[in-house]
Amino acid sequence: MLCQKKVIFMGKHNDGKKVNENETLKVKKGDLVKVDYIAALRNGIIFDTSIGFEADNCGIIDQEREYNAMEFIVGNSVIKSIDEHIVGMTINESKTFVIKPEDAFGLRDGKKVIELPKTTIPKREPIIGEHFVIMDKQKNPRSCFVKEIRGDLMLVDFNHPLAGHEIIMTVKVLCINGKPSASEKKSEDTNEEIKRYY
């Protein structure tokens, strides 16, 4: 399930108070960072986030998933575009940017849409939109979904469901090389107090 809502991250502001010294640090290549993120499509539909209450608000909560900030070394992240945009950001800073399809879930490939016998899904009738996994000739699992039913055949698509889509990514830097923002530090201190209490 996807969710359509306006993405808002509270960024940095200076109200005359002393700024935490950690919040003057800037992200550079090779840094270990923690970021919260919200990923949406061009039409504003949110399909993924690291923030539990956001996922809950959107109706995309996964009860079996732990919602934590994404942690990675800048220059070695799964999505190259995130590395490019996060360099130069400071702790507690938010940024929204566009990830091209080829840098996200790939471009759509017509050759990955093929006909298969309905019996590929054993013991039952396939359902349009259904996702399933089959083994290729090299015995590797391949994920696909049913696009159409054509008599005894079904048209299946091995493209990722979000292939061909631009991704609107909003990120907020929480920590650089183990040095957290004031809000992140407060959260950690609260967790430690809870652990000591119990």
Image: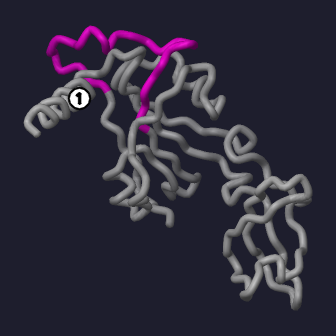
Neighbours of disc 1 within 10 Å: few (<14), some (14-19), many (20+): few
The amino acid beneath tag 1 is Glu
Give the residue displayed 31% in from the left and 20% down from the top. Answer: 180
Q: In which quarter of the image is residue 191?
A: top left
**Which residue appears at 84% of the width and 75% of the height?**
155
Which contiguous range is marked in magenta?
A: 12-36
Q: Is residue 30 magenta?
A: yes
SS at badge 1: helix
Residue position for label 1: 188
Query: Residue 90, position in %: x, y?
Result: 40, 18
In the depicted structure, whether residue 182 falls above or below residue 25: below
Q: Looking at the image, which residue is at 72% across and 53% down?
A: 163
Q: Where 183 sits versus 179, above or below?
A: below
- Between residue 156 and residue 195, name the one nearer to us: 195
Q: Main secondary structure of the magenta part?
A: loop
Whole-percent x, y for residue 19 in the image: 22, 13
- Classify residue 104 as left or right of residue 69: right
The front one of 116 and 149 is: 116
- The answer to if 48 sits in the magenta stretch is no
Q: Residue 36: where, in percent of width, then height?
A: 41, 36
Q: In what quadrant of the picture does the C terminus appear? A: top left
79 sits left or right of 134 in the view: left
Please say if 65 is above or below 20: below
Would you say 174 lies left or right of 98 here?
A: left
